[in-house]
Image (tube, helix red, strand yellow):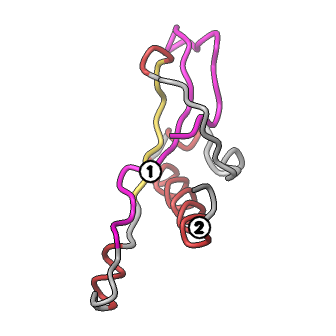
Amino acid sequence: MVVVKSFNEGMRDRPYGHCLVTGIKEYASKVIRKDSTKKIAKKSRVSCFIKLMNYEHLIPTCYFLDVDLKDMVTVDALQTKDKKMAACNATKERSKKTLKIGKNR
């Protein structure tokens, strides 16, 4: 889970401190040599999520992800389903790219 933007004071509909997060819901499975190309494509799928979370439900860690998501994921993306899916797909593509390169291990 990556914190994209934080709202310390809260907003009118959420009067508590919260943040916009995005992350990987389902990560890629292990691929072995005897898997077919169809099975490899299925195992390589990654799904993501975008949501607003309360600070009370977050546990900070010392991990660092070298992917810039601030230009793709905004609070406006949560207003309609089309914008949310577009932002989620863009996040998924960037996550796949870093997964295939082998960065951030």
Amino acid carrying label 2: it is Gly
Which one is in front, 40 or 79?
A: 40
Q: Does the magenta stretch include residue 58?
A: no
Residue 75 picture location, percent across and down: 59, 35
Residue 21 picture location, percent across and down: 53, 36
The answer to whether 65 appears left or right of 100 in the picture is right
Q: Distance between the residues labelled 1 and 2?
A: 16 Å
Sequence-first tag of 1 and 2: 1
The answer to whether 86 appears left or right of 27 in the picture is right
Q: Could you tell me which residue is drawn at 30 percent across and 88 percent down? A: 38
Q: Could you tell me which residue is drawn at 38 percent across and 69 percent down? A: 45
Which one is in front, 58 or 10?
A: 58
Q: Could you tell me which residue is drawn at 49 percent across and 49 percent down? A: 84
Instruction: Please tell me whether mark 1 sits on a helix, a strand or a loop.
Output: strand
Residue 30 picture location, percent across and down: 34, 70
Instruction: Please tell me whether mark 2 sits on a helix, a strand or a loop.
Output: loop
- Circles 1 and 2: CB distance less than 8 Å? no
Image vertical order of residue 100 relative to residue 19, above or below: below
Q: Residue 102 carries which label?
A: 2
> Where is the C terminus found, in terms of image quarters?
bottom right
Amino acid carrying label 1: it is Ile
Disc nearest the viewer among 1 and 2: 2
Give the magenta range: 1-30
| Number of other residues with Cα within 10 Å of mark 1, as a class: few under 14, some 14 to 19, many 20 or more | some
Q: Could you tell me which residue is drawn at 64 percent across and 9 percent down? A: 9
**Displayed quadrant of residue 98:** bottom right
Image vertical order of residue 11 relative to residue 40, above or below: above
| Number of other residues with Cα within 10 Å of mark 2, as a class: few under 14, some 14 to 19, many 20 or more | few
Q: Is residue 3 magenta?
A: yes
Residue 97 picture location, percent across and down: 59, 69
Q: Which mark is residue 24?
A: 1
